[in-house]
């Protein structure tokens, strides 16, 4: 079996979160989804599980963080172009997300940051490794 990553996020409104992640370009895998959680697919090996607080609490060993007021993690998604960065963030904003600052341009990488309804922070970036500064 290929190595995969499943990111589990506690969300307050499952339907709004489903709509938001769909707008970003994730697809729902109904095989691993029910009325308490949705499996959102980014790629063949990358999945985000959006879970109600009740469902998430069943797996948690600590209280659920308030990610609206405190940063718990930053999740980064790579894409194939700056246009794709802009399209994803624009779609996320239309779906109710909140942009955190302006596009960052590092020469070899451009990124924009967007938060979902619960404050989970996503960086969407394009990187051209051929432009990475030489040492």
Image: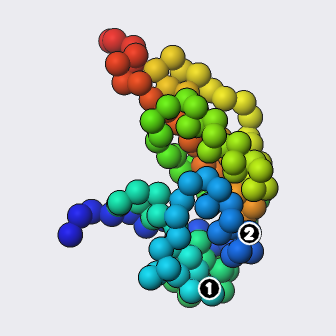
Can you name the residue that lies furthest to the top here? 134
Secondary structure under the numbered disc 1 in the rendered image: loop
Where is residue 10? Give x, y as percent: 63, 72
Q: State the quadrant of the C terminus.
A: top left
Q: Quadrant of residue 120?
A: bottom right
Q: Nearer the viewer, residue 83 or 124?
A: 83
Q: What's the residue at 62%, 44% (across, down)?
A: 88
Q: Is residue 92 left or right of residue 126?
A: right
Where is residue 57? Give x, y as percent: 60, 83
- The numbered dot on residue 36 is 1
Q: Nearer the viewer, residue 113 or 35?
A: 35
Q: What's the residue at 66%, 43% (across, down)?
A: 89
> Disc 1 versus disc 2: distance between alpha carbons?
13 Å
Q: State the quadrant of the N terminus.
A: bottom left
In the figure, 87 relative to 131: above or below? below
User: How many numbered discs sit on the rendered protein?
Assistant: 2
Q: Quadrant of residue 66?
A: bottom right
Residue occupied by mark 2:
16
In the figure, 100 relative to 110: above or below? below
């Amino acid at each position: 079996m290929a190595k995969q990553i499943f990111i589990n996020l506690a969300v307050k409104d499952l339907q709004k979160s489903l709509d938001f992640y769909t707008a970003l370009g994730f697809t729902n895998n109904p095989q691993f989804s029910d009325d308490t959680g949705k499996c959102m697919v980014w790629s063949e090996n990358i999945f985000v599980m959006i879970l109600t607080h009740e469902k998430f609490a069943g797996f948690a060993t600590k209280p659920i963080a308030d990610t609206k007021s405190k940063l718990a993690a930053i999740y980064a998604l790579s894409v194939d172009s700056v246009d794709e960065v802009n399209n994803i963030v624009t779609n996320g904003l239309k779906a109710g997300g909140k942009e955190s600052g302006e596009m960052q341009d590092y020469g070899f990488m451009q990124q924009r940051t967007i938060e979902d309804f619960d404050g989970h922070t996503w960086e969407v970036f394009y990187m051209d490794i051929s432009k990475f500064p030489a040492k």
